[in-house]
Image (cartoon, rainbow, N blue to C red):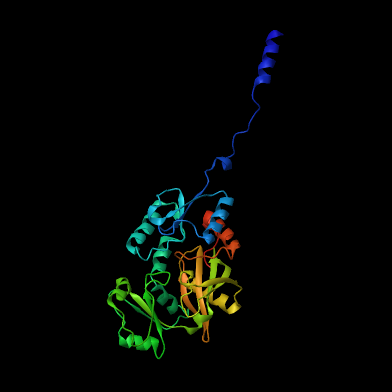
Amino acid sequence: MGDGASRATRARRLPPFTAPPTFEAMRPAPLIQLATCRHLPDLTASDAVLRRALEARGAAVTVAPWDLMPADPDALVCPRSTWDYYIHWPEFRDWIERAGREARAVWNPPETLRWNADKIYLRELEARGVALPRTRWFEPGERPDAGALAEVCGEGKGVLKPRISGTAYATFVVDAGTQLAEPQWRPLERWGSLLQAFVPEIAGGEVSLVFVAGAFSHAVLKRPAPGEFRVQNDHGGTVEPLVPGADLLAFAGRAVAAAGRPWLYARVDVVDTARGPLLMELEMLEPDLFFTEGPAGAERLADALLDPAAIPSTP
């Protein structure tokens, strides 16, 4: 009886049974690396909305300038505000390639990022039926001559900018008689340039339609400051939510479909003109996606980044 009492006492002292952790509990949190740039290393207000959506789904999110971001074979890399890529294009292109080899995945994929970085992609979209302003493209080292300026500008004006550029970098309003200074030509000649007819309707604003994981998400109207044509906030532009009409939405859908490349996020910049909508840019590399104006888009992108195979990549 004494031995039985001893066993009973020992049993009472055993710790309560705890079930082993499930497989789901043991699985490490998915790692998402959001790439920025050195002069703006933190997330924008828009991308902070995306970060919160990712973390709410259990992801571990890190943020770093693209050229300081450590390689991690378990990470999914998402370029967000890499807004100096056009200044450091060879290095950025190498980083895209390296991330594609070393990271678990990159979205948008390297092939799409490379294609979208050079604005000559617009020529491909135009060949597929997407309307642009009257445009001519020039190779590295080439300058538009008087004939090209007259052809594109006519009696009006044109916009001349580098093929690899952002935030209206080295962008000039020109006419048939414009003469640029030598320092102004350097960024235009380095990677080639494009010359487009000036679209006067830009004074009323440019519409940005955001697509996420195969579907339209939301839109904004970007208005330039009085007397300006550049709509970026760096140049005094403002942003307001917009519900696009059916014609703009259909046009934007055709533009993303014409890209013919995989993507999870895209922004279609359009100016509505007397001749109909005109595509200004199809942004798949580092666009501001305006998630502060469309937070549901951040939720959808978070789902897609964590399981991109589950959602189609064309609208």
In the image, residue 235 lies at what x, y percent? 46, 72
Q: Which residue lies most toward the top here?
A: 2
Q: Quadrant of residue 50?
A: bottom right
Q: Is residue 85 left or right of residue 251?
A: left
Tell which of 171 and 228 is nearer to you: 228
Tell which of 113 and 220 is nearer to you: 220
- Which quadrant does the N terminus fall into? top right
Height in image: 92 above or below 253?
Answer: above
In the image, residue 169 lies at what x, y percent? 39, 71
Q: Which residue lies most toward the right here?
A: 1
Q: Which residue lies most toward the bottom here?
A: 155
In the image, residue 64 lies at what x, y percent? 44, 53
Count of numbered labels shown in the rendering: 0
| Residue at the image position 70 percent from the left and 8 percent from the top | 2
Height in image: 210 above or below 41?
Answer: below
Q: Is residue 248 left or right of residue 162?
A: right
Tell which of 194 and 155 is nearer to you: 155
- Which quadrant does the C terminus fall into? bottom right
Q: In this view, does 29 lie to the left or right of 118?
A: right
| Residue at the image position 66 percent from the left and 20 percent from the top | 13
Tell which of 148 and 221 is nearer to you: 221
Height in image: 167 above or below 13?
Answer: below
Can see residue 315? no
